[in-house]
Image: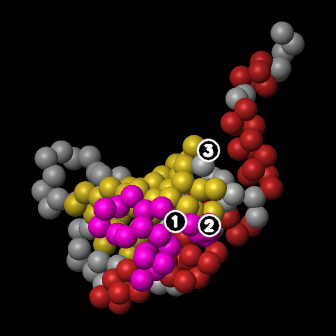
Amino acid sequence: MPVGVGWVQRLTFASLVAALVLAVMPASAAYVYGAVRPKNPAEATVVAFLDTAFNQRKVEEAFARYVGPYYRQHNPTVADGKQALIDALRQWLPATPGLHYEFKHAYSDGDRVIVHSLVTVHSTDRGKAVVDIFRLEHGKVVEHWDVAQSVPDKPLNDNTMF
């Protein structure tokens, strides 16, 4: 094998695609959200969706820009469909004026994006560690799962939840 060629053979198809995506990703996708710098358009879409809907409280804009023709909800406390979530957020967000997503990590694999966040509802709230999982079609959010765990006052170890 010629010198300097081995690294090319070790590249995976996914890493080549990621490099190409980053090379052509629009400048708007290069925004940094807290500790998160989206690495590809899918991550940029999901983080922008969460930021627009929850932190900026622009629910209709978030759905118009980032959500596909349908929205399948897997959280059993929220009704299925785009309009159901828009209606729920219209009621819930005014009742939680201090709500804030602090994005800690974003990961993606194909059409799935995972965002790990600290979600608080007021300045002294320890918050919840929330993992939102999204599926995208044609660059738009179409499906959502989430899990949440309260940040304890006295953890039993010195590790953080993030």
Reading the chain from its start, which is encountered first: label 1 or label 3? 1
Q: Is residue 79 magenta?
A: yes
Closest to the camera, between mark 3 and mark 2, is: 2
Q: Residues within 10 Å of mark 1 (few under 14, many from 20)?
A: many
Residue 20 located left or right of residue 82: right
Q: Tag 3, which secondary structure?
A: loop
Quick check: marks 2 and 1 in contact, CB under 8 Å? yes
The image position of residue 74, as x and y in percent, is 39, 58
Task: Classify mark 2: helix, strand or loop.
Answer: strand
Q: Is residue 107 left or right of residue 129?
A: right
Q: Inspect this view and state whether residue 106 appears.
A: no
Amino acid type, callout 3? Gly
Question: Which segment did they paint magenta?
Answer: 66-87
Q: What amino acid is at disc 2?
A: Gly
Category of crowding for the residue at label 3, using alpha-carbon neighbours closer than 10 angstroms: few (below 14), some (14–19), many (at least 20) = few
- Mark sitting on residue 71: 1
Which circle marks residue 68 in the picture? 2
Q: Which residue is mark 3?
A: 110
Secondary structure state at the residue bearing disc 1: strand
Q: Position of residue 63 (x, y in %)?
A: 56, 76
* Residue farthest toward the top in the current orientation of the protein: 1
Front residue of 46/79: it is 79
